[in-house]
Each structure stands twice: as C-alpha cells, then as structure tokens.
Amino acid sequence: MADPHELYTFLLRVGDDNLILAQRLGELVSWMPELEEDIAVANVALDHLGQARNVLTYAARMAGPDASEDTLAMERSEREFLNAVLVEQPNGDFGQTMARQLFVDAYQVPFYEALATSSDDTVAGIAAKAVKEARYHLARSSNWVVVLGDGTDESHQRMQAGIDAMWRYTADLFFTDETEEALQQAGILPSFDNIRGTFDDTVSSVLARGLLALPEDPYQRIGGRTGFHTEHLGHLLPDMQALHRANAGASW
Amino acid sequence: MVTDTPASVLDRVRQNVQEVTDPEIPVLTIADLGVLRSVELIDSEVVVTITPTYSGCPAMAHIESQVRQAIKLAGASGRVVTVFSPPWSTDFITVAGREKLEAYGIAPPHPAAHGSAGTGSTVHIRPAIRCPQCGSTNTKIISEFGSTACKALYQCQACAEPFDYFKEL
Ligand SMILES: [Zn+2]
C-alpha cells in the first residue's frame, strides 16, 4: 500500500506544472502579437489553470482539513513547489514561449494518456479530460514552431534561439523518484516508460518540419520536482500570491 | 393537500435542473450540452451529477450554483456532484442542442475524432464547416481559439460573415 503522502507529492508535481505555466501564460494576455493569439494564449492558460485546480483540489484532500486548492497555490513557498523548472522559465520572445509550450505539450499528451489508465478513478478522470486539451495545445504549438522555423531568416533564427534556450530544462519533466516508484508498485500509477520516447519522436518530427535542430550542448538543469528551482520561480510567486496573502481568506 | 412522493419531488427537480442554461451560450440548457449527467434519489437525498466541458471552464461554478437554486426551488434538498469520467465530448450535445446552436449563429460540432496519436500532426483534417448564416461550406478558419475555449473562429468566404464554430472535442 502506497503512503497517501506519496500520492500527495505526485499530485503537487502535476498540479504545479500546470499552475506555474498558467501564471506565465497569463502574463502574456494583452501582449501577444495579434488579437487571435491573445485569445488563444488566454484559453491555453485557462486550460492549464483548470487542470491545476482539479489536481490541487484532490491533493488538498490529503493535506488536512484546512487545506484547499487556494492554500496550496497561494500559501506555499518556493521550495515547496514541485513543478519542473521548464514551466517557470520567462516568456522571452514569441519563439521562446512557443518552444517552451511545444516541449510541455509533447510531454503532457503521452503523460496524460498514461495517467488516464491509473487505477485511481479521480486521477484517471482528470487525466482523460486533460489529454484532449493537451492534444489541441500540441497542434497549435507545433504549427507555430514549424511556421516560424520555416519562415523568414529572422523568425527561423529566433525560433532556433528559443529551442536552444529551453531545451536544457526538458529533462526535469521526466524526473521521477521513489514517489512514483511506490505508486507504481502499489498499482496506482501506470508505467511511464513510453513517455520519453513519444516526446522525443514528437519533438524531432516537429523540428525537422520547421528546419530546426536540437542544441548540441548536453547540459540539463533538473531539481524542480524536489523543490530546487531556478531563480525565476522566486520572482513569479510574489506576483501570483500577493493578492491572496494581503487579503487572507477573501473570496469573490 | 397534495402528497409529495419522493418520485414527484424528483420529477420537479429534474424539470427545474434541465432548464438551467449555459451562461456563455444561453440558448443551450445543460441537458442540451450533455453537462447534466443524472438526477437521482440516493438515500432520500437528491443528487445531481454534472461534468465540465473543459478543465478550466469558468461557467461551471455558475452552473453549479444555478443547479443548487433549481433543487431548492423544487422544494427539495440535495447536492451537486462533479464528475470527470467519462470525459465530456461534443458528441454528448443533443440533436436539439445542435439545432439551437446553428439557429443562434454558432456552427455545431462535427463528430469527435477518438484516440488520435500524440505525434503533433500539424495538419488538421476537418470536414468543411457550414456557415450558419448562409449555409455555404466555403469557409476558412481564422483562429483555433474563439471567444471561449470551446469555440474556434471561422469566416465565410461566400457571405463574408465571421462566425464561431463549436470545436469537436
Ligand atoms: Zn456565409
């Protein structure tokens, strides 16, 4: 039997990926290059926020009577967030935003497909819903990466720069430890063995169509899944949490 | 005096709950949308089960409070349960719902494709979407995302009107 604490930790890893990415994408609303993209980025952010809310609401049930999706989102500090470091990276230019989104989407589609077979009905239900959204996100981000990569000299160069800047944070998406192992042994989580292969296939096919390449530098920064973040999360959290912390218990 | 049997209470609740509308597409009821899953009597308590269209659908909180109000107005006590499984699909939208959508100026969804592989195909092969204004199928997509998460923005090439397409999901 897996410890409820292990399921809690796993849910934070999934929920925080979506919460922090939603916050980053929300920063872009009203700043996108055209109106349609402004609406698109807000809708993608809303999907990630919804996924975060569903996962964190479930996690809160394992965190005591006073816990809720709000306390988990707004009252934890940097070291307690377990998102992969990729999602906290700054938006940069449109190329960097789309590179980050492509990597997240290419990971989330096979990840949620696997998670939808969990023996935990709540986890499986949330994932079965989320995978449909992730597929739609992937269609949009791969489209943009191909269009920009196979576009003008400048769009190609900036799309490639975005890929180069974000690639080093992708291994963190796939980090697992004794938490996932215990849940898999207990039969709660399925095997995640095929996720990395599907991700690699998706990314290399999209990059090839966009005449883009992965960087040669093999360096990868991991640590987010155990609370060791890049400097950027520490700047994002005060912005996200300020209102709640200044008005504890407020609702509207 | 009318005797209130559990069955008649349940009927009244069902009647009221079926009339709750989507705040973003007010011509559709939650029954038309397939958001309403069931209205049951469990241990002499009314249980209404609903399912969200999208994970982040901002209308769900509003729909939930409208359902609670509908239960109360039927003179019953009960609760609202939200389930995710089986996940909502546009295939759950009823025939009546599709007709209401088109009359409202939103092109109704085509049947959803199931089990697409996660390979990020950039080619969206979609049957031609019919303009709800003039009926022409000579239409083009303007944006994958429209005024809400569930819609895409199209434009008709025949009558030049822009319109929303309820995306198949
Ligand atoms: Zn037309």
Image (tube, coloured by chain):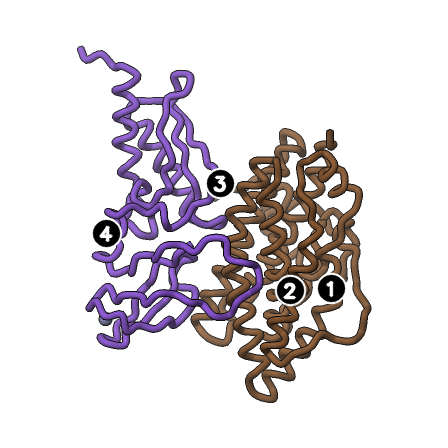
- CA–CA distance in space, label 4 to label 3: 26 Å
* Pointer 2 or 1: first along the chain: 2
Chain assigned purple: B
The reply to whether the C-beta atoms of the residues labelled 2 and 3 are less than 8 Å apart is no
Q: Colour of chain A?
A: brown
Find numbered disc 4 in the image and state the secondary structure of the residue it sits on: helix
Dot 3 amino acid type:
Phe
- For image coordinates 32% across by 63% down, the residue present is B164
* Residue at mark 4: B100
Mark with earlier residue (4, 3): 3
Asked if the residues shown at circle 4 and circle 2 are in contact, with their CB atoms under 8 angstroms apart, the answer is no
Amino acid type of disc 4? Answer: Lys
Three-letter code for the amino acid on which mark 1 is drawn:
Tyr
* Same-chain check, marks 4 and 3: yes
Q: What is the spatial separation of the Cα atoms under label 2 and label 3, in whole angstroms?
A: 26 Å
Residue hosting label 1? A169
Residue A245 in sight: no
Query: Percent position (x, y) of residue A187?
Result: 69, 35
Q: Secondary structure at mark 1?
A: loop
